[in-house]
Image (cartoon, helix red, strand yellow):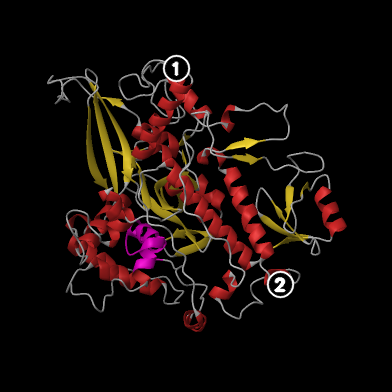
Amino acid sequence: MSTANPPSAPFIPTSRLLTQDFFPGDHAASHGCPHIKPFKKSADIVANYQILVRYSLHYKNRHALGVLTSSKDKKRPRNSEDSVPNGKAIQQLPTPACLTCDTILGRIHACLHCVFVGCWKGEHSQKHSKDSGHTFSMEVSRCGLYCNHCKDFIYDRDFEGVYNSELIRTSEIISMVQEPGQKRPRYLKWHAGNKEAAAIKSGTKLKPCQGLRGLRNMGSTCFMNVILQCFIHNPLLRSYFLSDQHSSKRCEVKADCMGCEMDQLFTQFYSGVKAPYGPCSFLHTMWMSSSDLAGYAQQDAHEFFISALNQIHAKSPSAKLHHCNCVIHKTFAGLLQSDVTCMNCANVTTAFDPILDISLDLRPTKRSKSNGNKVRGGNDEKNEGPNSLADCLDRYTHPEKLGTNEYNCSKCGKNGQDATKQLSIKVVPPVLSFQLKRFEHSMGASKIETKIKFPAQLDMTQYTAAARKLKKNKLSALQKANGVSGPESSGNGIIGSTASSMSMNNGLLDPIPTYVYNLFAVINHQGKMDTGHYTAFAKHRGEWFSLDDHKVSLASQKEVLDSKAYMLFYVKQTLDYDFANALKD
């Protein structure tokens, strides 16, 4: 494995800092420490901070970047995790250690005025600052800026901008290393000029209740209320409708336009009114568009979600049958890859299916010990205990054997040939929507009450087609380097246990930043199947809120993660490619 050659990132110029670019003349608000302003005039300390941040981020992500590390301690054995599959490294990064006592523990600080590195626990960093008179240092592991005069970590907008820029740059490099053939537009940061900054200051007013409002229940309409709340707190939908990209005043659709209803909904939520809102018009338009949802009977929230997406798409001016560029497909649409492998000739047939969400099967928390057909997943060896979203995704993307009459191989010409089928995600959508199948209709209507553990941050790397291909290539190179003979798979698309163990030990599935998601909304269902009640949690301005029809209350992240979720909504942490271009790739 070799690292890609990323475009060189320029260092912060000495003449202009980020604060001067964004809010010219507003230097007082750029820092909270009175000692740092004189040092920023030459910008040497900012450039030094940028170098150290880049080093710190590269060291943290050394496995993903394929970089070896070197340590002063010759007795310290080189671990397998500090090597790359082909045994070569582009460069070596020194392990951050105190220059006085050689320890790598105890909060290592690097001086921003010279090349000294010292530990905090042994007070070597403090002693250096006192003896040399140097004021600022950076805590290497977290890139925190420390002032020796203030005796505390400090915040500065310029240094925060440097850190964020380097974080984006490192994420781009990791993506290029992990997926060298993937094409992505580069991230361009926008800086406001004098006129733009003045317009932002004069025209921006922050109202505490904007975007947070209860919805009245108009007769068993809680299923609709939770979906509308998830739409409102969806960052991509919010940006689209609040920027007037679909205006109900300019819309050419004369009646029953769901895009206009969404525009009116956002207008109501951001009007500053605190009283609960009754979405009568939205409900009426849905009744007119989808006769199955008409009436006051309790409906399924997921069915309403899919129907609403279809109706918004159908009335969009840019709606197309293929490669649609409407807001719904830009937000929710992904591409599922299905690989069917013939057991006789190993021929692989690949098909692609568009998706707007992913429905995952559940299993009970307890299973009979006499059941020999174990369900595949991360908790297979545990007959008891909570299930997790990762287990559900493992089962969803795990190879399954097809029946004898389900597959005819086009290569070997055999009818009724045994084969395996495996799903993976070809294109991950900007917003991931999961439905956990809690309602069963096979042998009478019933509800699965199994608790599903789900994370606040989700890494989808191992479930993507690109990462799976990358893993196989790395594994093949690793086996060749270690002299392992034999095929890398067992012939049915399943990598053997030995290969999987080697993969895990050598970091072949490091997270790719573009596949990391953050949770922003959860829908729950309490009670029985026909007489239950829907509630939701949503994240607003960094805080979680419980949304129960007209009731809105503050919630903790623990409450959210402990809930029995029915639907989950995640948004990509890094939005760095266009959906239409991704499909062409």
Which amino acid, by three-letter code, is at mark 2?
A: Lys
Depicted 554 relative to depicted 15: above or below: above
Depicted 413 relative to depicted 131: above or below: above
Q: Could you tell me residue 331's position as x and y percent? A: 33, 57
**Left or right of 23 in this view: 148:** right
Q: Main secondary structure of the magenta part?
A: helix
Q: Could you tell me residue 489's position as x and y percent? A: 36, 21
* Residue at the disc numbered 1: 484
Does the magenta-highlighted stretch encompass residue 290?
no
Identify which residue, 13 or 563, lies in the foreground: 13
The residue depicted at 24 percent of the width and 62 percent of the height is: 312
Which amino acid, by three-letter code, is at mark 1?
A: Val
Query: Which label was assigned to residue 37?
Result: 2
Depicted 561 relative to depicted 76: above or below: below
Q: Which residues are magenta?
A: 215-240
Question: Marks 2 and 1: CB-CB under 8 Å?
Answer: no
